[in-house]
Image (tube, rainbow, N blue to C red):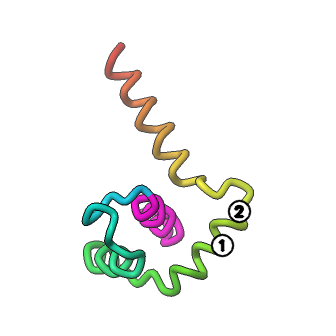
Amino acid sequence: TDNKISLVELIYALYIQGSFNRGTADIKELSSAFEKLFNVDLGDIYRSYIEIKGRQNPTKFLDELKTKLNAKIRVEDN
């Protein structure tokens, strides 16, 4: 189980990518849907986003996801 800030990072990435409703879903809609889906209260996602922006590596969670997925693919291909 990751922390809430990781989920907020993922939600913002999906929002910026325009991954839902042909890019028309707003950030509040997405965060509400994820809160319901995962039964979690994300609190003030705008404040969390400011925290993400202030980190040394703003995309820490996304980078970890990418690294782990690529490693799994490499292992399976060998």
Residue 57 location in percent, x, y?
Answer: 68, 54
Mark 2 in CB contact with mark 1 (< 8 angstroms): yes
Name the mark on residue 55.
Answer: 2
Task: Give the label on residue 51, or none.
Answer: 1
Start-end of magenta stretch: 1-16
The residue lying toward the viewer, choosing from 70 and 45, is: 45
Q: Is residue 19 above or below residue 8?
A: above
Element carrying mark 2: loop
- Expressed as whole percent of the image width and height from the top left, the position of residue 36 reads 27, 80
The question of residue 3 being in magenta is answered with yes
Q: Mark 2, residues whose alpha carbon is within 10 Å: few (<14), some, or many (≥20)?
A: few
In the displayed structure, 11 sits above or below 32; it is above
Q: For the view shown, which residue lies furthest in the top direction?
A: 78
Q: CA distance from mark 2 to mark 1?
A: 7 Å
Residue at point 53%, 45% (across, down):
64
Q: Is residue 51 above or below residue 15?
A: below
Q: Amino acid at mark 1?
A: Glu
Q: Amino acid at mark 2?
A: Arg
Which quadrant holds residue 18? bottom left
Q: Quadrant of the N terminus?
A: bottom left
